[in-house]
Amino acid sequence: MKRIFLTLSLVTFIILSFSSCSGVRQVAGVQSTSFTPDYVRVESNINDYVLLGESVVSIESREYLGFIKKIDKVNGEYYNFRDVKIVELEGNTNIDLRGDIKMSLYKVVDEYPQADYYVPTVKKTEVERMFMGKFVKESVVIKAYQLRP
């Protein structure tokens, strides 16, 4: 009798626990429209910008066996892996500065913090091949612009 009662109460508990998890799903369809304009046009020319200056950022690294990489210098200073500063330049256009060069971009932001736009103009990569490795030196010239008030 005790065993039947225990089994019956266990089955009742399981059925109630599964049935209590179900809920009522309500779906409401509401139509809306966007009030933001589809196209915004800003007229500007070169006279609307002031060139603050340009800066050259660089990084020197070594690579062995195609996957072992060691960074030697960032902006002419020896690299300290405990003090890493990374800046990512992003915008509407595809600014293609990938990889380790992002570690050197802090220099241009430190030199021209008031700039509104940073435009990379020249990217130069020098590769010195060795047996089972290579030395790589990358440098980028970045110009800093500010909107004319």
Image (cartoon, rainbow, N blue to C red):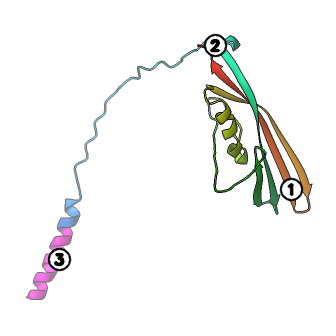
Observer-nearest residue: 123 or 112? 112
Q: At 39% from the left edge and 23% from the top edge, which residue is drawn?
A: 33
Q: Residues within 10 Å of mark 3 (few under 14, many from 20)?
A: few
For the stretch drawn in magenta, what is the main secondary structure? helix
The secondary structure type at the circle numbered 2 is: loop
The secondary structure type at the circle numbered 1 is: strand
Residue beneath disc 3: 10
Looking at the rendering, in which quadrant would you find the C terminus? Answer: top right
Residue beneath disc 1: 134
**How far across and down, in percent of the image, does residue 27 sit?**
28, 40
What's drawn in magenta, residue-wise?
1-15
Q: Amino acid at mark 1?
A: Lys
Give the mark nearest the N terminus, 2 or 1: 2
Q: At 76% from the left edge and 58% from the top edge, which residue is drawn?
A: 70
Observer-nearest residue: 11 or 111? 111
| Residue 94 location, quadrant | top right
Q: Which labelled disc corresponds to residue 53? A: none
The secondary structure type at the circle numbered 3 is: helix
Give the mark nearest the N terminus, 2 or 3: 3
Q: Amino acid at mark 2?
A: Ser
Residue beneath disc 2: 44
Image label count: 3
